[in-house]
Image (cartoon, coloured by chain):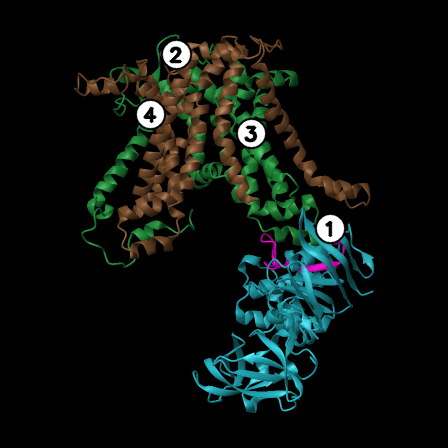
């Protein structure tokens, strides 16, 4: 039993099931990110943990205590909202104090805590301003400050960075991570941004269509996606997925793919697929596993170099993204910036098959 | 309305080359002064009755009956005003309109206050504590605003009798409160629907209860809609005639009913100047509100027509 | 406040807290159930009874309705409502739209003009009625003034003319409400996406075409709202008639609303009065219910 246990929890509105049976268990101090496209059920699940939405069936427990029927205020949680939800009529001080006031904490104690939190988040000069006078980043800090005064068992974040501009978002992301490392509080964090998920979390639950598609550490999710949805959703640029057929190559099982010029190429697998010749699969290879020859990982066991025609090049400063046709799809590789690659010409692509994954095209599930 | 993109800015031209030879360019074919002349003409049309009331309330009766209704007073006098206020024959007694003006005040203030408070609480429940059938309840409430009140006159007369409120100012307060709830709820519901629900959720997590959230979080931000609602209710209730005529006695009549009695009384000479002075008195409170808070008045009118 | 304090206690207090929102709403629901829907049912029932000066519960079936349609004054009232309603709605919309478009031409004193157009809406219909009653009175009003200015043959006695008096009601009602319709259309004009207008201008649309083809069709919601508001005001019109003509000359300007009042309270024909009220309600419901239905459905 973990610190936060979600056991077969579901949520329905009438006949519509927005969250199917969900099991997640995390330990104290973990940083769980619920990630997925909008409408996947992640915010609903967060609201259920907060007690803002009731559980239709199943159970959510914190510290082993079932939360069914327990009011939000009595769950010992704190929440940071997407819009920050700062009370517009109160000063920053009033906003931070409100929750403590509601819980009957005496004034001197409140003041002490406000001082602590303000110092931690460096918002002391803002304490007597109204939320309307603050910038986005400052509001974000105040919202976190309000949550921090609660000493909660679990911190809940509902897309807290989505209203910030790109630069500030990166800064605040770092701050949240620092805060987690300093305080060690358990966090459940909802986002649709897979980079936030990968950078912040100790564990990720990828959600889609009301189902948890995969629950795992960032590395597990990134390297071993359980299905094609997770493979495509996590990582940027996203994983290349293209059709291939299992054949043999120099006595080892290999994936046969058709290149843009009509020729066939064979990519030997690092492991597996013995005796499965003829099987249709979807091959998944991340862009960084498709490189120029010299940029390839020297420790790779199954490195295959093929000549393929370059369709488009997209220089991105530190790297250059190179697009070619494989299996009838556009496949992106990540080359070093100074490689003399030109569109329309053939060029050697080094494919690291150690990093390749395969999926069943029908079930879209991972073939291990 | 203030933040809506103004089409006038577009029509003023944004640097697009003018197309000459187009069939009819409103701006080009109608010179600006014609436009202004038409608009001014309509200003005169709307102001005419006000001018008639005002100028004729300040002149002796003889000037009106001699065909001088459109002229400014030859001899300025405030006698019609004092007569209308304190000595004119209203119904059977020569009390002037003063006691009825007081009745209207006594009726309007509590009725507006009560229906506004009820509307605020209803709007809060209907938006932030939604339950199954909330929209239906709201729809039924709203329909109640639009029924012809002829439908309720007969049973309401009986009900007021049963409650011991027949023919009294408190009776009118009650009636206006009851039939004012619908619009108050409409205003507050539409306003609170746009109020971020996340704030309510944050307050719930902070441990605030139903009333605390209303009192500390929503109410402090409700100033604008409260003004709109109060102005709407004030105007409507002050201007009501049907309920006043149906449910009041001689000594509890509101201003509108008394004014009508003053004007329609068939005994003696028709003192037009006194009638006009009385009409302005009956109009002054709402005109004052319009002058001071016209913006809110308009917003109230619009909200009353554009529902949902 | 005290309720939320007691809600701190567990058990029964918890349930009270959960029920609190509904508890707060319940007085309103009860009031509306009784004073709107209960009363509607009561009046509806009365319309099938032999009530005269007081409610009475002898069932007479459709007799009141049959009688109602045999009463000449009711025919007059319905015919008047048709004339008044059609003209009132049509003129208000035409005038309102015209003024809104004129005001939308970057007018210098727009705020002041808008204020002047709209102030009649703040007045009581009784005040409006008094002002227009004497202004239209041939003895002292417009006719007398014109003659006084030397136009001896000028004649304008509609308010005393049984055939024309209903049009004076239209004049006064239009004066009171058209500014409001103007404001509704103006708000609609201002709400139109400016990028679309810019695109139309780049497409070469003239101002006239811009209004006719793009702007006015998009005012459909404003037209709908204006129609619903005006129609229900027309059907409920009571005060203005009382103040302006008192229903006269004779019964020339009776409307269903005044008919109902006089049959119920002065002629002691409560059953017939109730029947006329039911017909008014049905007419309004036919307009309002579909409107509310569509407005509230979009929301949820």
Question: Mainly helix, strand or loop, the magenta region?
Answer: loop
Q: Nearer the viewer, mark 4 or mark 3?
A: 3
Q: Which mark is residue C251?
A: 2
- Please name the residue shown 39% across and 22% down the image: C82
- Please name the residue shown 46% across and 21% down the image: B256
Relative to B34, residue C253 above or below = above
Circle 4 is placed at which residue position?
Answer: C171
Tell me the distance, in whole angstroms, between the alpha carbons under discs 1 and 3. 36 Å
Picture quadrant of residue B65: top left
- Helix, strand, or loop for circle 1? loop
Q: Nearer the viewer, residue B282 or C67?
A: C67
Circle 3 is placed at which residue position?
Answer: B144
Q: Confirm or deny contact between disc 2 and disc 4 (CB under 8 A).
A: no
The tint chain A carries is: cyan
Magenta extent: A71-93
Relative to A168, residue C184 above or below = above
Circle 1 is placed at which residue position?
Answer: A56
Asked if labels 1 and 3 share a chain, the reply is no
- Helix, strand, or loop for circle 4? helix
Q: Chain of mark 3?
A: B
- Please name the residue shown 57% across and 47% down the image: B221
């Amino acid at each position: 039993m973990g610190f936060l246990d979600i056991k077969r929890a579901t949520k329905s509105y009438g006949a519509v099931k927005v969250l199917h049976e969900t099991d997640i268990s995390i330990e104290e101090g973990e940083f769980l990110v619920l990630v997925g496209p909008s409408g996947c059920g992640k915010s609903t699940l967060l609201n259920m943990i907060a007690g803002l939405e009731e559980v239709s069936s199943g159970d959510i427990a914190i510290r082993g205590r079932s939360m069914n029927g327990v009011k939000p205020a009595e769950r010992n949680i704190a929440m940071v909202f997407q819009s920050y939800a700062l009370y517009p009529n109160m000063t920053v001080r009033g906003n931070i104090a409100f929750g403590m006031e509601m819980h009957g904490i005496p004034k001197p104690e409140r003041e002490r805590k406000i001082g602590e939190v303000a110092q931690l988040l460096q918002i002391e000069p803002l304490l007597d301003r109204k939320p309307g006078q603050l910038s986005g980043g400052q509001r974000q800090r105040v919202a976190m400050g309000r949550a921090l005064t609660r000493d909660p068992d679990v911190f809940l974040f509902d897309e807290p960075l989505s209203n910030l501009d790109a630069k500030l978002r990166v800064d605040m992301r770092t701050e949240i991570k620092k805060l987690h490392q300093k305080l060690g509080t358990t966090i459940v964090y909802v986002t649709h941004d897979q980079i936030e998920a990968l950078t912040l979390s100790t564990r990720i639950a990828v959600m889609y269509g009301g189902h948890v598609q995969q629950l795992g550490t960032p590395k597990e999710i990134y390297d071993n996606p359980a299905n094609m949805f997770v493979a495509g959703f996590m990582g940027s640029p996203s994983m290349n997925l293209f059709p291939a057929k299992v054949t043999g190559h120099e006595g080892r099982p290999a994936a046969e793919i058709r290149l843009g010029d009509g020729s066939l190429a064979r990519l030997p697998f690092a492991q597996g697929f013995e005796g499965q010749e003829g099987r249709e699969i979807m091959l998944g290879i991340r862009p960084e596993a498709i490189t120029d020859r010299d940029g390839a990982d020297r420790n790779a066991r199954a490195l295959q170099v093929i000549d393929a025609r370059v369709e488009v090049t997209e220089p991105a400063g530190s790297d250059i993204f190179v697009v070619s046709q494989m299996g009838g799809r556009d496949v992106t590789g990540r080359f070093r910036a100074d490689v003399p690659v030109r569109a329309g010409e053939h060029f050697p692509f080094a494919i690291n098959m150690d990093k390749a994954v395969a999926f069943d095209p029908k079930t879209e599930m991972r073939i291990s | 309305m203030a933040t809506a993109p103004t089409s006038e800015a577009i029509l003023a031209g944004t640097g697009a080359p003018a197309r000459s030879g187009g069939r009819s360019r409103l701006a080009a074919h109608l010179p600006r002064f014609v436009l202004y002349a038409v608009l001014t003409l309509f200003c005169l049309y709307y102001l005419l009755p006000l001018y008639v009331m005002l100028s004729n309330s300040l002149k002796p009766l003889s000037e009106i009956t001699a065909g001088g209704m459109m002229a400014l007073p030859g001899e300025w006098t405030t006698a019609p005003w004092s007569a209308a206020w304190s000595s004119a024959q209203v119904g059977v007694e020569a009390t002037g309109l003063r006691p009825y003006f007081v009745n209207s005040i006594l009726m309007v203030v509590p009725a507006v206050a009560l229906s506004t408070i009820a509307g605020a609480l209803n709007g809060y429940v209907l938006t932030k504590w939604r339950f199954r059938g909330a929209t239906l309840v709201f729809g039924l409430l709203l329909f109640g605003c639009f029924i012809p009140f002829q439908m309720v006159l007969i049973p309401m007369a009986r009900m007021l009798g049963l409650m011991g409120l027949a023919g009294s100012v408190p009776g009118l307060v009650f009636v206006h409160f009851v039939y004012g709830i619908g619009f108050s709820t409409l205003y507050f519901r539409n306003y609170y629907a746009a109020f971020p629900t996340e704030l309510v959720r944050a307050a719930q997590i902070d441990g605030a209860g139903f009333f605390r959230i209303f009192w500390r979080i929503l109410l402090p931000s409700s100033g604008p809609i409260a003004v709109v609602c109060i102005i709407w209710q004030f105007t409507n209730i002050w201007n009501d005639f049907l309920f006043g005529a149906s449910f009041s006695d001689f000594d509890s009549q509101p201003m509108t009913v008394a004014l009508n009695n003053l004007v329609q009384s068939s005994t003696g000479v028709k003192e037009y100047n006194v009638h006009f002075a009385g009409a302005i008195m009956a109009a002054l409170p709402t005109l004052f509100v319009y002058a001071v808070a016209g913006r809110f008045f308009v917003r109230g009118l619009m909200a009353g027509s554009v529902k949902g | 406040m005290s309720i939320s304090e007691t809600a701190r206690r567990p058990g029964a207090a918890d349930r009270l807290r959960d029920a609190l929102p509904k508890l707060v709403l319940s007085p309103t629901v009860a009031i509306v159930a009784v004073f709107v829907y209960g009363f509607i049912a009561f009046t509806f029932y009365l319309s099938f009874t032999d009530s005269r000066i007081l409610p009475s519960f002898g069932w007479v079936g459709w007799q009141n309705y049959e009688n109602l349609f045999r009463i000449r004054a009711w025919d007059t009232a319905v015919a008047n409502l048709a004339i008044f309603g059609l003209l009132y709605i049509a003129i208000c919309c035409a005038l309102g739209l015209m003024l809104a478009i004129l005001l939308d031409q970057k007018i210098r004193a727009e705020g002041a003009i808008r204020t002047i157009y709209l102030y009649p809406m703040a007045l009581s219909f009784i005040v409006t009625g008094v002002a227009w009653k004497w202004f239209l009175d041939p003895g002292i009003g417009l006719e007398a003034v014109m003659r006084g200015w030397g136009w001896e043959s000028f004649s304008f006695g509609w308010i005393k003319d049984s055939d024309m008096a209903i049009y004076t009601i239209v004049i006064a009602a239009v004066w009171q409400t058209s500014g409001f319709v103007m404001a509704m259309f103006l708000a609609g004009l201002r709400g139109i996406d400016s990028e679309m207008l810019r695109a139309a201008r780049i497409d070469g649309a003239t101002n006239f075409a811009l209004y006719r083809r793009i702007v006015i069709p998009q005012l459909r919601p404003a037209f709908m709202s204006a129609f619903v508001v005006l129609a229900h005001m027309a059907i409920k019109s009571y005060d203005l008639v009382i103040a302006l003509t008192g229903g006269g000359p004779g019964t020339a300007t009776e409307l269903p609303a005044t008919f109902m009042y006089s049959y119920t309270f002065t002629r002691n024909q409560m059953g017939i009065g109730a029947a006329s009220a039911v017909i008014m309600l049905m007419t309004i419901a036919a307009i309002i219910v579909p409107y509310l239905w569509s407005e509230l459905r979009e929301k949820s």
